[in-house]
Amino acid sequence: MLSWLSQVATVTWVNLRTIVERRGASLATVVGVAGVVIVFVAVFSIAEGVRHALTSNATSDTAIVLRSGSDSEMMSGLERDDTRIIAEAPGVRRSAAGPVASAELYVIVDVPKRSTGTDANVPLRGVQPAAFEVRDEVRMVEGRRFEPGRNEVVVGRAAASQFKGLDLGNRLRWGQNEWTVVGIFSANGGLAESEIWCDAGVLQPAYRRGSSFQSVYAKLESPAAFQKFKDSLTSDPRLDVKVVEESEYYASQSEALVGLIRALGIVITVLMGVGAIFGALNTMYAAVATRTREIATLRALGFRGGPVILSVLTESLLLALVGGVFGAAVAYLAFNGFQTSTLNWSTFSQLSFSFTVTPLLLAWGLASAVLMGSIGGLFPAIRAARLPVATALREL
């Protein structure tokens, strides 16, 4: 065993010491693998950012009530009497101000993007005062909350950074009203940061919605109270509603968009990965060709084929790993936390999110680099091991 390991170390050292002489081809392999890892991490960090924005703040002790048969708030409709019955249902948490439940209205307004100046669909959500208790992650970071009954809005921090005109103190005209931005809030990077909030009672006449709402968000006494709350509403003959946990609702909304982004990422990574593998193959075949004499000499001295295979694979893996580490570092520094927006297909409005590069994503990027290095070095390694000694010695 010691002799076999000694042979591996000797042949590997022979290979590695000549990398500098082949630095052009070696660098091409490193850069190719790094490019694949950068694209892989960047695309999948988009999917992770979207998933985080949609689901990070969703909890199992918050319920969303929609009209029966509705897949999203945009398709739902509830009357004022319905929302009162829902708010008084058993299982809803109560505070000194009453039930912790917010009947809400959701409309889309046009706001130009800061980057391009083109109009984008931004959600304007009419809420009731309890909304700030239902979503207890919401914190004002500038200004103040809107006052009920007034034409005032508060803007999510992500929306304020992505779209023009949403700065503190600005006036904007939506519907039949002119609105004043009086505050900017954060929500731990969640979906609410993509929205603009105002008083639902003021939003209804501005868009001629009468006394209608689209959803009710209710904070429950505990996650265990959900079934009691759901049963009381679905069995009430006065109502025709659908009750879902907030976490389940937003998980289902994220599935289609996240799945599409990941599928696109896999396709792009595979296509680029094939190119990187061919680059590694060319590099290692060239390396074997330039060391034919050395390998033949070692084989003539009694070195076996196994150490030769491992030595070539080690060099290929080392080059791929260097490229993988470099690519992962560049991807993390360039993309992690980068904020942008995309279309949320469930609501046809803009969803602001940040690229999220996780340790697991970096690990997968490095794993893909190792895989490319293994494939790229395998066939040249086998060729080196099978090289007839007599044929190779003729070149001496």
Image: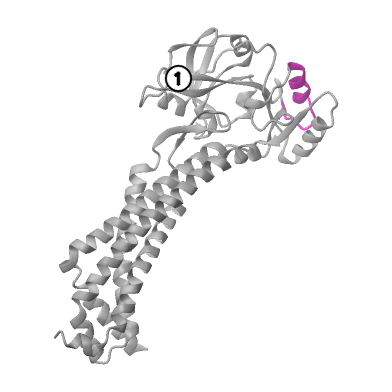
- 72 vs 46, left or right, is right
- 295 vs 202, left or right, is left
Q: Secondary structure at mark 1?
A: strand
Q: Position of residue 32 (x, y in %)?
A: 29, 56
Q: Nearer the viewer, residue 136 or 389?
A: 389
Q: Amino acid at mark 1?
A: Val
In which quadrant of the rendered view does residue 4 lie?
bottom left
Q: Residue at x 18, y 61 (%)?
A: 24
In which quadrant of the rendered view does residue 374 lie?
bottom left
Q: Residue at x 21, y 75 (%)?
A: 289
Label 1: how many Cα within 10 Å (few below 14, some 14–19, many 20+): many
Q: Is residue 294 above or below residue 338?
A: below
Q: Position of residue 145 (x, y in %)?
A: 54, 18
Is 170 magenta? The answer is no
Q: Nearer the viewer, residue 281 or 240?
A: 281
**Scheme of image coloration:** one colour
Locate the N terminus and report the quarter of the image it occupies: bottom left
Q: Residue at x 22, y 90 (%)?
A: 390
Q: Is residue 254 visible?
A: yes
In which quadrant of the rendered view does residue 164 lie?
top left
| Residue identified by numbered label 1 | 111
Magenta residues, as a range? 80-94
Q: Position of residue 163 (x, y in %)?
A: 42, 23
Number of marks in the rendered image: 1
Q: Is residue 88 above or below residue 223?
A: above
Q: Is residue 358 visible?
A: no
Locate the C terminus and report the quarter of the image it occupies: bottom left
Q: Position of residue 362 (x, y in %)?
A: 41, 53
Q: Residue at x 56, y 40 (%)?
A: 254
Q: Is residue 3 above or below residue 20?
A: below
- 241 vs 247, left or right, is right
Q: Is residue 389 above or below residue 273?
A: below
